[in-house]
Amino acid sequence: MPDIRRISIDQKIQEANDLIANRIREKRREYNIPMVDIMGSVGSGKTSILEYFAEKYRSTHKLLVINGDLATDIDAQRIGRFGSTCLQINTGRGCHLLAFQIEKAFEEIEFENYEFIFVENVGNLICPSSTDVGADMKIAVTSVTEGPYVFQKHPITFKISQLAVLNKIDLAPAMEIDVDTVISRAKEIYPLLEIIPTSAKTGVGMDTLSAKIGLESV
Ligand SMILES: Nc1nc2c(ncn2[C@@H]2O[C@H](COP(=O)(O)OP(=O)(O)O)[C@@H](O)[C@H]2O)c(=O)[nH]1
Ligand SMILES: [Mg+2]
């Protein structure tokens, strides 16, 4: 009889990640710094939203952004030019950030210098939903240029998100997308999910988003 044993590595890794994520939350609580994890496909507008906030609050808020990207620091450069501190994590083949990477990035900074932390997770709408990075809130960003069925096609992501953003609504006419219809169909699946229509280009909805995540009031 062969000696075959099944080792549950996934669960152990997940447990180790969650321990670190809780440690991150405790540490932030000490300093009273909120943290939001932004998930979304490549091109949905995550960096543009962060650029908008970095510019708007450049002289009033001390923002820290942790950027997850497979290989580049393009997004960190884009946001950093408005004066926010950006910590770049390159994940190589990793399709999402892990709590230990965030904790490691925190070694680079003094917490007392910051009032709000954003995580721009690696660009895709699937993997980041499965991992707690120690944030207070996960936000899922999608955009009208991804078509009308993103909410239906990513059930786990929108189920676990505390807030969703439907970005690029300035492009809705060109995409022949009716924003109200997309949102009302999404609400049939996720009745409790708040969905904020935005345009990081024109600024529509950006004050609502800022208020909802508590950025306006820090
Ligand atoms: N028209 C329009 N373009 C946008 C908007 N948000 C982002 N973009 C553009 O979409 C592209 C991808 O945006 P980016 O912020 O890099 O997306 P990310 O990959 O999710 O970080 C860029 O060319 C942005 O200028 C928006 O609200 N309206
Ligand atoms: Mg980006």
Image (cartoon, rainbow, N blue to C red):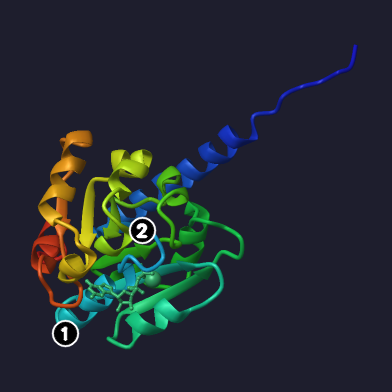
Quarter containing the C terminus: bottom left
Instruction: Tell me which residue sits at (40%, 68%) in the image.
Output: 66
Which residue occupies the foreground of this view, 96 or 24? Answer: 96
Side of 90 relative to 216 (left or right) = right
Q: Residues within 10 Å of mark 2 (few under 14, many from 20)?
A: many
Which residue occupies the foreground of this view, 143 or 82? Answer: 143
Say whether marks 1 and 2 touch (CB < 8 Å). no
Side of 57 relative to 82 (left or right) = left
Q: Amino acid at mark 2?
A: Gly
Q: CA distance from mark 1 to mark 2?
A: 28 Å
Which residue occupies the foreground of this view, 145 or 193? Answer: 145
Residue 59 numbered mark, or none: 1
Q: Is residue 103 visible?
A: yes
Q: Quadrant of ligand 1?
A: bottom left
Residue 136 numbered mark, or none: none
Q: Residues within 10 Å of mark 1 (few under 14, many from 20)?
A: few
Residue underneath mark 2: 40
Residue 48 placement (x, y as % from top left): 28, 75
Instruction: Tell me which residue sits at (39%, 76%) in the image.
Output: 86
Residue 27 placement (x, y as % from top left): 36, 54
Which residue occupies the foreground of this view, 130 or 199? Answer: 199
Outermost residue on the right side: it is 1
Side of 22 relative to 136 (left or right) = right
| Picture quadrant where residue 192 is located | top left
Instruction: Tell me which residue sits at (37%, 65%) in the image.
Output: 120
Question: Which type of secondary structure does the marked residue at label 2 adopt?
Answer: strand
Residue 78 placement (x, y as % from top left): 36, 83
